[in-house]
Structure formats: C-alpha cells, structure tokens
Image: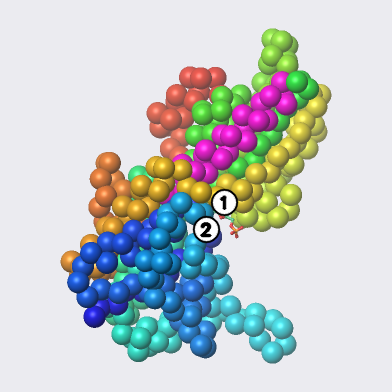
C-alpha cells in the first residue's frame, strides 16, 4: 500500500482538522492508500520514539467541526532552523533538514502533505528540492498569502472579532467611551478591515496605512461634538503611527505587541498624550480569534483544500501548494506560494468603500 504523511506546523487555525479529515476521507476512496499523521510538526519525525499515527476513520470522524489540530502544532520544529537546547541552557539554531530528509526516506512515505503558513511552505520547498514528494496546504487566519485569494480560518477570525466588536459597541454607547479593540494581523490588516466594515467602526488602523494620532484626536472630538458620544476603533496588532508623529513601533513583531500588552494600550496612551479627553478603554482579543469551531465557509474551504491535496498526490504533482483563486480550487508551485505577501492595497476598492462609509484610517 501507499502511505501519506500529514502534518500541521506554525500557529493553529480553525479549519486545520477539516483539512486533515478531507485528505483522509478522499484517500479512503482510493484503493491501497493509507494516511498517517505526524504529531507536533516535524518533531514527530525527529523525536525518539517517533510519533506517527495511522489516521483511521475513528480518529478523523467529525473533526472538521473542531478547532485546533488533532495532530498538535508548534513553532519549534523548523528543520532548517531547529532550536536545540544546549547543556548550558542556551538555545542554538541548527540546520537539521538533511537529517529530516534521511528520516523521511527511511519511513518510505509516498507523499508528505505540509499544512502551514508562509514559514512552513518555505520548509516544504527545501524538502521538495532535497527529493521529498511534498504538497503544501496554506494556513493562516491573517489571510496574508498572495498565492491564494483566501485562507481558511480568516472568516472565523473575522466572525469572532465582529461578535466581540458588537458587544463593545453597546457598552461604548452606554458610557460615552472610546473603545479600542485590537485584533490579530502582524503584517496585514485584513481582519481589522473586515471587522471594521462588518461592525461599523468609526476608525480602522492597519499596518498598511500608518496613522496620524492628531487626526484621530480631531476625528474623535468631532464625533462627540456632533452628539454621537462614543467611538469604536479597530486596530490591527501590526498597525503603527506615521513616522515622525510619534515614536514608531514598526519593526516589533505583532505577537510581541500582544505579549507586551498590545498596541491597543499604546494607542490609548498616544491619544491621551495628544489631547483626547474622552474616556478610553482597551480590549486585546488575542488568541480567541484562533480558537473554537470554524464557520461553515472555512470548513468548506479547508475540506476542499484537503481533497485537492490528495488529488495532487494521486497525479504526482509534487512541489505544489493548493490555492483558492477566482472561486476555484487550484494549485501553484511552492516557489510562487512563498514569493509575495498579500497586503491590503491602499488603493483597493475595499479601502475606498470603507472611506466612503466614513471609516477613518487616520491618514
Ligand atoms: O500568523 C497568525 C497569528 O495569529 C498572527 O496574527 C499573530 O501575530 C501570531 O500568529 C501569534 O502567534 P503565536 O502567539 O502563536 O506565536
């Protein structure tokens, strides 16, 4: 029989289990194929004893409804830059890709399906170049991969953020407050922008459009003057002020912002320092955006990605990543897959429409 190894790498994302189930279900329809899961990214191969489990229908049944990944995941299994803890307690990063390739070859897998984001697909490319038959499946709630029009997990994250936004609106209104809600999006403002339009925010701050704090203060004051005594702001964790208007936070990783207390708190201080007299409260949504059950759209997209990934294996079209383009499930080379980011274009219709709705970007 022929064997496929499936693994999930990087941060988790609603829909990962739907991909795993999609591959396994589709493979069961073909004679002689078996699917296996590697536990915790490539650590399942590196670890002794190795952690590789047969994906029976009992294991994968109904998992498309569940968030997270039954295979577990980690940011610490990158074979090209593997963190090895030294006897003195320090960490050294080493290239273990040749070791991984040798181990994978010894396990006799006919295909490896690597479900992961930008970093994971760069690893897919290295392994493919070293002779491993790899297929990639894109994953990120941030929606910032240019090779696919949309990634699964994104719609779920937007839904969670919108539900939270709606709740903040009623309390903002009661207290005449400025509410700042921070959402994920290290490099791209997709979640923030979609949430701002879905929720009806007054202000939306994204990494692609640096904001001017003084303009925001004026905008808030005007809204209070007009008698609408509350303001709801959505800010992406990677957003930063215009150079020169305030100390720039650009360059810090979004995830570090979250750990430091969030850009929501930084913005709050910037507004007060620039003369905003309204009462301000901050909310950092954080990882709730990545948790729980995927919405129907993400379940469908993730399942189709899984089915397509298996079909690419059948067709021996290795070195490719599945993608969603023009309302169609297709594939691109791993090279194309990792070439560009998908940033919000400042001249896009989405931004134009948001401005038409009087959403301020602070620019
Ligand atoms: O890339 C997805 C993402 O959720 C980002 O929006 C966020 O900055 C990052 O992952 C957080 O990652 P973690 O906390 O898992 O390291």
Q: Which residue is mark 1?
A: 291
Q: Secondary structure at mark 2?
A: loop
Image quarter (top left, top right, bottom left or bottom right) of the N terminus = bottom left
The quadrant in which residue 112 appears is bottom left
Q: Which mark is residue 68?
A: 2
Q: Which mark is residue 154?
A: none
Quick one: 318 or 236, which is closer to the camera? 318
**Residue 37, x across and y down, in percent:** 41, 72
Q: Is residue 170 magenta?
A: yes
Q: Secondary structure at mark 1?
A: loop
Residue shown at 37%/70% (left/top)? 56
Question: Which stretch appears magenta?
Answer: 152-173
Q: Within 10 Å of the Cα at label 2, are there few (<14), some (14-19), or many (20+) other Cα atoms?
A: many
The alpha-carbon separation of the residues under discs 2 and 1 comes to 7 Å
Quick one: 95 or 148, which is closer to the camera? 148
Quick one: 153 or 318, which is closer to the camera? 153
**Residue 282, x across and y down, in percent:** 73, 37
Relative placement, left or right, of 199 versus 98 is: right
**Residue 20, x across and y down, in percent:** 39, 62
Is residue 123 visible to the viewer in this orientation of the structure?
no
Relative placement, left or right, of 260 versus 353 is: right
**Residue 301, x across and y down, in percent:** 36, 48
Evaluate if marks 2 and 1 touch, with contact meaning CB atoms under 8 Å apart.
yes
Q: Is residue 40 magenta?
A: no
């Amino acid at each position: 029989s022929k064997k496929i190894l499936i693994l999930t790498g990087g941060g988790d994302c609603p829909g990962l289990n739907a991909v795993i189930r999609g591959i396994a279900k589709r493979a069961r329809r073909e004679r002689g194929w078996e699917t296996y899961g590697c536990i915790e990214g490539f650590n399942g191969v590196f670890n002794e004893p190795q952690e590789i489990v047969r994906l029976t229908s009992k294991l994968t049944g109904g998992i498309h409804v569940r968030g997270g990944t039954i295979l577990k995941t980690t940011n610490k299994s990158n074979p090209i830059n593997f963190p090895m803890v030294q006897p003195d307690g320090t960490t050294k990063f080493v290239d273990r890709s040749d070791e991984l390739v040798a181990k994978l070859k010894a396990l006799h897998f006919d295909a490896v399906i690597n479900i992961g984001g930008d970093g994971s697909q760069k690893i897919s490319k290295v392994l493919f170049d070293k002779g491993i038959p790899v297929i990639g499946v894109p994953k990120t709630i941030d929606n910032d991969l240019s090779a696919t029009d949309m990634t699964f997990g994104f719609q779920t994250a937007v839904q969670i953020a919108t539900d939270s936004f709606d709740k903040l609106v009623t309390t903002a209104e009661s207290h005449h407050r400025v509410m700042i809600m921070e959402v994920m999006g290290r490099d791209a403002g997709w979640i923030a922008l979609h949430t701002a339009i879905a929720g009806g925010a007054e202000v939306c701050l994204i990494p692609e459009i640096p904001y001017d704090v003084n303009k925001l203060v004026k905008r808030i004051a005007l809204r209070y003057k007009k008698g609408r005594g509350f303001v709801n702001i959505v800010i992406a964790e990677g957003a930063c002020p215009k150079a020169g208007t305030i100390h720039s936070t650009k360059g810090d990783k979004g995830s570090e912002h979250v750990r430091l207390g969030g850009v929501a708190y930084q913005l709050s201080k910037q507004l007060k320092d620039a003369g905003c007299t309204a009462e301000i409260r901050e909310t950092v949504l954080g990882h709730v955006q990545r948790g729980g059950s995927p919405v129907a759209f993400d379940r469908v997209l993730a399942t189709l990605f899984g089915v397509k990934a298996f079909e690419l294996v059948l067709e021996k079209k290795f070195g490719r990543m599945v993608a969603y383009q023009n309302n169609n499930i297709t594939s691109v080379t791993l090279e194309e897959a990792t070439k560009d980011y998908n940033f919000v274009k400042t001249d896009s219709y989405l931004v134009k429409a948001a401005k038409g709705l009087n959403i301020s970007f602070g620019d």
